[in-house]
Image (tube, grey):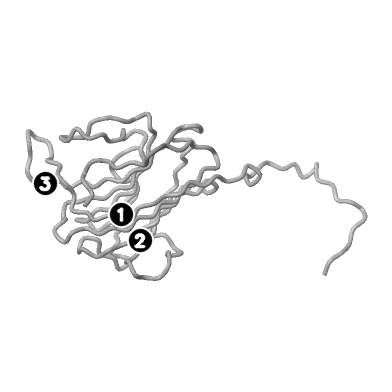
Amino acid sequence: MLPHNLLVTSRPFKLSPGTSLSSYIAFSFSPNATHTHLAILLFSSKFLPLSGPGSGNPVPSEERLVGVVFDARANNVGVCVGSVDPSVVRDLGSVGLAIGGGEKLRSWVDYDASSKELEVRVQKSGSEDRPYEPVLAHPVNFSRLWGDGANLMLGISSVSESSSKDGGNDVVGSGNVNVFSWEYRVRELPSSMHSMPVDPSACHVGQQGRHVG
């Protein structure tokens, strides 16, 4: 069972223009987890620690945060950039998925350095290999958000919001989320693969050659 406080990777990784990121998670929401969210979060290590609402647990600053959030109540997945409110949301019922019923699911979150796009794939456990088409894609430029050379952390968190109030603030308790597996991989695009401006006038073709075909 994953508590609502933030679980982060053991050490940060350094961002460069060629940094791509992939994360895989297998999870399920308990059938009664109607007010529960599961989030995969990416943020700069310098924004820790801060205290979360009503918990005292370290959470990243919203200003420099990118997250993929699964909402059991709304049966959707959203991408958050610079805020806990999603910038874009996809109804998972539209692709035949119900995440709040206790079924085990798998998700892949990928950021590609060349396209500057974050993609989310979700499917039922036991289905075929990783889906080709993402259920959600959203443009985001990590280098513009944090700056090259930033030390980034990856984490997961679940939050269950009670309908009761405590001094006008939402009561935050343990999330009814089971996480079976979580892993990530950071890749660096070789500098020779970055697109560079080319001056056609500087290209010369030798007079001797062989025609093929």
- Cα distance between the residues tagged 2 and 1: 9 Å
- The image position of residue 47, as x and y in percent, is 34, 30
Q: CA distance from mark 2 to mark 3?
A: 27 Å
Question: Is 123 drawn above or below residue 188 in the view shown?
Answer: below
Residue at point 21%, 52% (across, down): 1
**Could you say whether the residue bearing mark 1 is in a helix, strand or loop?**
strand
Q: Give the x, y percent position of residue 125.
A: 32, 66
Q: Is residue 114 left or right of residue 182?
A: right
The three-letter code of the residue at mark 3 reads: Ser
Q: Which three-letter amino acid code belongs to the residue tagged 1?
A: Val
Mark 1, Cα crowd under 10 Å, few <14 / some 14-19 / many 20+, is: many
Question: Pointer 2: what residue?
Answer: 122
Q: Which residue is mark 1?
A: 77
Foreground residue among 98 and 139: 98
Residue 201 falls in which quadrant of the image? top right
Q: Is residue 9 above or below residue 74?
A: above
Residue at left 19%, top 32%? 56
Q: Nearer the viewer, residue 182 or 166?
A: 182
In the image, residue 96 above or below residue 111: below
Mark 3 lies on residue:
162
State which tag comes first along the sequence, 2 or 1.
1
In screen coordinates, is 206 left or right of 58? right
Q: Quadrant of the C terminus?
A: bottom right
Q: Residue furthest right?
A: 208
Are discs 2 and 1 less than 8 Å apart at CB? yes
Mark closest to the chain's N terminus, 2 or 3: 2
Position above or below: 207 against 155: below
